[in-house]
Amino acid sequence: MRILVIDDDVGMLGALKELLCSYGHEVVCVNSAEKGIAADPNSFEFILLDYKMPGHDGSWFLRNAKVERKTRILLITAYVNKDVIKSMFDLGVSGYLIKPFDADDLMRHLEFFSGDPVALDRGDADGDASAANS
């Protein structure tokens, strides 16, 4: 699966890229909403999107990227606010994970939203990765 990760935390980007690639996914990471738009979000099957980033936030990305419904979007955020989460759903996210989250939580979400049990198949890779706070 082609996955776009948008997060301002470089450590988070690296950890997610390593984890997702270990499951055989093709992963592109960018550190801003603007770069997310430049990456052609409709060419991805899945987007992992941070909410709170310097400059433009995740809601700006959703309002400006015009992501097609076929591309699933999972909000990943440490910023827990009921109104923000509701507005992100209104803008098109499929679900959300609160940081910090572990690898198993992320992979279960990918499997659920993609409908692809292969999202969890990583062969000999180690399943202990965990994502950091941001």
Image (cartoon, rainbow, N blue to C red):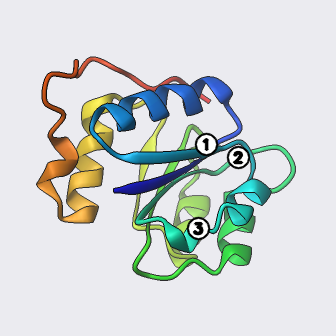
Alpha carbon of mark 3 to alpha carbon of mark 2: how far? Answer: 19 Å
- Say which element carries label 1: loop
State the mark number for residue 87: none
Residue 63 percent across, percent down from the top left: 70, 76
Q: Is residue 98 above or below residue 74?
A: above
Residue at (58% x, 67% y) in the render = 41
Question: Between tags 1 and 2, which lies in front?
Answer: 2
Q: Amino acid at mark 1?
A: Tyr
Q: Quadrant of residue 37?
A: bottom right
- Say which element carries label 3: helix
Judge the density around disc 3: few (<14), some (14-19), many (≥20) Cα neighbours within 10 Å: many
Residue closer to the observer: 79 or 74: 74
Question: Between tags 1 and 3, which lies in front?
Answer: 3
Marks 1 and 2 close (CB-CB < 8 Å) = yes
Q: Quadrant of the C terminus?
A: top right
Q: Amino acid at mark 3?
A: Pro
Residue denoted by label 1: 79
State the mark number for residue 52: 2
Judge the density around disc 2: few (<14), some (14-19), many (≥20) Cα neighbours within 10 Å: some
- Mark 3 or 2 closer to N-term? 3
- Say which element carries label 2: loop
- Mark 1 or 3 closer to N-term? 3
Q: Quadrant of residue 22?
A: top left
Question: Between tags 3 and 2, which lies in front?
Answer: 3
State the mark number for residue 41: 3
Residue 116 percent across, percent down from the top left: 17, 59
Alpha carbon of mark 1 to alpha carbon of mark 3: how far? Answer: 23 Å
